Image: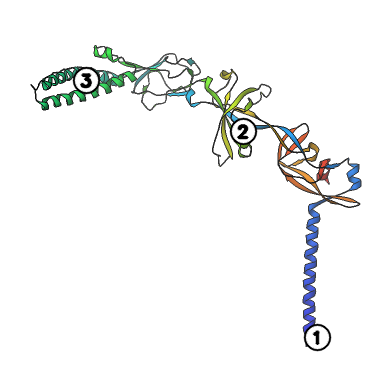
């Protein structure tokens, strides 16, 4: 019985030892799988070389995209203050109009009613003012009662408020109050261009009945064009106000336009992980651009020192970039490990790497490592 007991213990210990041994072999195999082994002879035959990343000064530029946008002060949407029948004079999409130029006339019974109310208010104000001044003089001489004077003053003040309100409405419609007071009425009022610019989004038909909430047209001042650029979060630290940019239209890479960063956004879009920035256009060719036009941009953020590796040290695959670090060597072989890197800019056949790598790496012939 005692021998049987010791036999069971021995079998158990053997099973545990076997399990540990298998686990150790598996770990060694995994480590070997992560390593790339290349013989010294293969390394020399392929003309491969090793070295370490070196610090280099890069002319840093950031490529992005954006849209031509008009500044808020360079766009005007036209509505009417009083509804009526619309008449316009030779308006056409894309035509230039100057500030103060007549766009529409609006015929409306409301206009006639407003002028009539103003004329009546003007006459009423004159009579109430005369009565107010008369009773004021009498009250000062203590001939008239204070109560009569106060009532006259109240009527005069109310009439004055009504008169001023109606006068302001006429002035907003560019109708001269003095002519209305003289009995000269007009059946229409005019809408003038609030800014100089090109007509866009014309949505009006001659003779239509227009309401106050109808959008009739838009004016675009091409001299107030700017570029809206979306800069990724990782690049925003390199953007400064006043920085020079180049931009070009799709398919016209050889024609470069220029601008400067005028403002930098202070919030990150959670979906695109980018920040909106704006740039003023330097070139006096803004009439070539259209509001909403797509552009490619190059932002020149100056020089900076970073770690660099030769072009042949980097292997790209499926949108990712890799280099090969030496992990060891013996009399026969070299041992390497593949690591993913983040590339920066590229100058003079050198690539900026944004990772902190100080190890010895393959600097020439790295593509052979991928094949190996």
Answer with mark 3 or mark 2, whichever residue precedes in sequence: 3
Q: Which residue is drawn at 12% across and 21% down?
A: 140
Point out the tag, 2 or 1, that comes first from the N-terminus: 1
Q: Where is residue 335 in the image (x, y as percent from the top left)?
A: 84, 50
Name the N-terminal-most of marks 3 and 1: 1
x, y percent for residue 76: 45, 23
Foreground tag (3 vs 1): 3
C-alpha separation, residue under disc 3 versus residue under disc 2: 61 Å
Residue at which label 1 appears: 3
* Disc assigned to residue 121: 3
Q: Give the structural element (helix, strand or loop) at label 3.
A: helix
The image quadrant that residue 193 belongs to is top left
**Which mark, residue 239?**
2
- In this view, the residue in front, 348 or 182, is 348
Rendered view: 299 above or below 91:
below
Where does the image place residue 206, in percent across and percent down from the top left? 40, 18
Q: Distance between the residues labelled 2 and 1?
A: 82 Å
The local secondary structure at tag 2 comes to: loop
| The one of 11 and 285 positioned closer to us in this rendering | 285
């Amino acid at each position: 019985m005692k021998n049987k007991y010791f036999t069971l213990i021995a079998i158990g210990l053997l099973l545990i030892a076997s399990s540990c041994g298998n686990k150790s072999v598996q770990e060694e195999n995994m480590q070997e799988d992560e390593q790339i082994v290349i013989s010294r002879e293969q390394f020399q035959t392929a003309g491969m070389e090793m070295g370490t990343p070196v610090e280099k000064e890069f002319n840093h530029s950031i490529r992005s995209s954006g849209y031509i946008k008009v500044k808020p002060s360079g766009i005007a949407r036209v509505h009417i203050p009083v509804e009526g029948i619309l008449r316009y004079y030779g308006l056409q999409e894309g035509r230039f109009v100057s500030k103060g130029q007549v766009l529409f006339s609006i015929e409306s019974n409301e206009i006639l009613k407003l002028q009539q109310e103003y004329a009546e208010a003007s006459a009423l104000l004159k009579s109430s003012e005369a009565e107010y001044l008369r009773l004021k003089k009498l009250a000062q001489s203590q001939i008239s009662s204070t109560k009569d004077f106060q009532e006259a003053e109240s009527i005069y003040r109310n009439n004055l408020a009504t008169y001023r309100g109606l006068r302001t409405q006429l002035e907003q419609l560019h109708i001269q109050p003095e002519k209305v007071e003289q009995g000269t009425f007009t059946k229409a009022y005019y809408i003038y261009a609030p800014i100089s610019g090109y007509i866009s989004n014309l949505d009006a038909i001659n003779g239509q009945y227009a309401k106050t909430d109808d959008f009739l047209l838009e004016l675009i001042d091409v001299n107030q064009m700017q570029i809206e650029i979306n800069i990724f979060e990782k690049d925003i630290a390199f953007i400064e106000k006043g920085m020079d940019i180049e931009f070009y239209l799709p398919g016209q890479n050889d024609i470069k336009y220029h601008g400067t960063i005028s403002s930098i956004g202070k919030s990150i879009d959670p979906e695109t992980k980018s920040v909106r920035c704006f740039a003023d256009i330097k070139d006096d060719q803004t009439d070539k651009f259209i509001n909403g036009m797509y552009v490619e941009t190059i932002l020149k953020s100056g020089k900076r020192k970073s770690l660099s590796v030769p072009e042949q040290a980097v292997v790209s695959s499926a949108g990712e970039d890799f280099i090969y670090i030496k992990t060891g060597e013996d009399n026969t072989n070299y041992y390497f490990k593949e690591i993913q890197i983040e590339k920066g800019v590229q100058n003079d056949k050198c690539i900026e790497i944004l990772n902190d790598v100080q190890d010895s790496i393959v600097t020439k012939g790295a593509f052979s490592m991928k094949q190996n």
